[in-house]
Amino acid sequence: MKGSINVSVENIFPLIKKFLYSDHEIFLRELISNATDATLKLKHLTSIGEAKVEYGNPKIEVKIDKENKKLHIIDQGLGMTAEEVEKYINQVAFSGAEEFLEKYKDSAKDSGIIGHFGLGFYSAFMVAEKVEIISKSYKDEPAVHWICDGSPEFTLEETTEKSERGTEIILHIAEDSLEFLEENKIRELLTKYNKFMPVPIKFGTKTETLPLPEGAAEDAVAETIEVDNIVNNPTPAWTKAPSELKDEDYKAFYHELYPMQFEEPLFNIHLNVDYPFNLTGILYFPKLSNNLNIEKDKIQLYQNQVFVTDEVKGIVPDFLMLLRGVIDSPDIPLNVSRSYLQADGAVKKISSYITKKVADKMVSLINENREDYDKKWDDIKIVIEYGMISEEKFFEKSDKFALYPTTDGKYFLWNELEEKIKPNQTDKDGNLVILYATNADEQHSYIQSAKDKGYEVLILDSPIVPHLIQKLETSKEKISFARVDADHINNLIKKDEPAISKLNETEKESLKKNVEESINDTKFTVQLEDLDSNDAPFTITQPEFMRRMKDMQATGGGGMFGMGGFPEMYNLVVNSNSEFASKILANENSEEKNAQIKHALDLAKLSQNLLKGKELTDFIQRSYKQLEK
Ligand code: ADP
Ligand code: MG
């Protein structure tokens, strides 16, 4: 018979070739998806007794015939009768997959059938100048042979060429697509798109060495045989129930997914939901500290075990983009624009489900083994902290799993922290003041002096900490954060009796004047404090607010202060009870006094990392000179 393909557009093929998919290589994914569908449909029909044939162990074969420029995709699925080819192939955009799902609505919804749009088959014409279908239905009907050369004309005839059930698709690869006759290219595509498809895919053969029989002679040569080279794993870990999987299985799957990753993941989260949407998958927390493959090893999105993309933005919440693993959902609309994806209801639900699962996992990890969780914290904190500032629901739960490490290597939950510091870290208004350092080395002297006073100092060193602190301060009652070198550390109620003033008011007055005149720098506000006599004579502190604004700006959060250019502002705290203060006051030699104050200021700057460049060079030279004296 001869006929015309039923489309309203005069010639749809040039259109398909140009516009249907930007990536020509996906033709193979589409044809293998169809072969998989055909196999799974047969499986379903045999399981419900509608097809009375042996299902057996069907596989799909991909074969290159380089000489004749042909690519074959052969399946052992349910096949098509002449009437079905007419209906499913000739009526472009009539999706047989959808019809099948509609017809067997209740029993087939978990059958894993992939097709959706009824255009997949025609993607073959993106790379082929002629396509043949040879198909033999499981029904007792003759095999058929369909040929189409890319024009709307086709031929469809009965044939005796094929006696086995199933379908063979033959692509006559076009001159501009000869790369698809290369073994390496096809292997690459099979690995990319079909690595976890549910029906075994054969691509060539390989030699296998048989084990020697027991008691074989020492010089016996092992026998080798040719076996099918199966390129996929039809039952990847995420398709199994969590109860079937051990820790090793999860780890093994991680390496199967990312063969170039040699580090072990920290832990995994098994996703499994079937209402109100279908989603399975496994997410892994990688060690982020020495993460080299962020760009390459990303979360992969599958649909019924067919790889779709590793661009999961919009589906996975932003803060989880650093994770690895797979998500498989037939409910994520594909081939649609990103902006549509973001507005899609199902996608939003998926994203908040994933967020919730991650929060739940954290709670169970910390409850199962606190010590181990503490150890992992530094590797996962970036993700968790980012989640806390970007997802309200996640933040609400975070008291149960977010840790606040101290400079002494303790890790507190929020309520533990509160309890610990409440007795001696409140200010006059009864607010809790949480001291933190962002760099244990650079702020060492400040940390030390805070610890000497019996304060706990947190170490919060992720780049997003300014935002996290702001979030905590606005969400929690009566708390404020102050970096160890901030000014309002002095606002903390001192637990001991107030120190006795060594100097009287007039003496203090003149000390202050001496210091101000000597340093002669408007960046510094001189402040006298009656500290312990052992505390440093000079200490530079920064207004917490100012410094934080600068930090926020540096990490891209200071939208409203986007102009930049905060003035440099510091406090110079002079300990009026120190030996040094008394010495200055008593010194009659104004030149020497001036030099001493300057030197002390340099020391204070040095401990705040503010002494740089020429100032530092001068300081060092001056110090050597003093040694020579
Ligand atoms: P979809 O897969 O979305 O239904 P396709 O264009 O990929 O759309 O395929 C159209 C239809 O052709 C399928 O639904 C199926 O009925 C039929 N078909 C395609 N390939 C095969 C095959 N290998 N075996 C049996 N039927 C097939
Ligand atoms: Mg299809």
Image: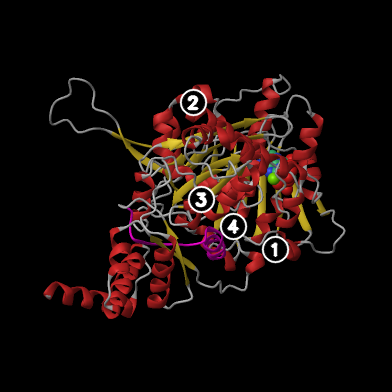
In this rendering, is residue 44 above or below 149?
above
The answer for how far apart the CA atoms under marks 1 and 4 are is: 12 Å
For disc 1, the neighbor class at 10 Å (few under 14, some 14 to 19, many from 20) is some
Q: Looking at the picture, which amino acid does disc 2 mark?
A: Asn
For marks 1 and 3, the one nearer the N-term is 1
Asked whether the beta carbons under mark 4 and mark 3 sit within 8 Å of each other, the answer is no
Q: Quadrant of residue 240?
A: top right
Instruction: State left or right for residue 617 relative to residue 295.
Output: left
Q: CA distance from mark 4 to mark 3?
A: 66 Å
- Determine which residue is flagged by label 3: 491
Mark 4 to mark 2: distance in Å? 47 Å
For the residues carrying marks 1 and 3, which lies nearer the camera in this image? 3
Residue type of the residue flagged with mark 1: Lys
Q: Residue at image x 50%, y 32%?
A: 419
Residue 264 appears in view: yes
Looking at the rendered structure, the secondary structure element under dot 1 is helix
Alpha carbon of mark 1 to alpha carbon of mark 2: how far?
56 Å
Nearer the N terminus, badge 1 or badge 4?
1
Q: Nearer the viewer, mark 4 or mark 3?
A: 3
What residue did someone put label 4 on?
25
Answer above or below: position of 44 versus 539: above
Q: Position of residue 84 (x, y in %)?
A: 78, 40
Residue 269's x, y, as percent? Answer: 53, 34
| Residue tagged 1 | 17
The mark that comes first in sequence, 4 or 2, is 4
Q: Quadrant of ligand 1?
A: top right
Q: Quick one: label 3, few (<14), some, or many (20+) residues within 10 Å?
A: few
Q: Is residue 307 magenta?
A: no
Farthest residue toward the right?
8
Q: Which residues are magenta?
A: 535-554
Q: Nearer the viewer, residue 153 or 198?
A: 198
| Residue assigned mark 2 | 367
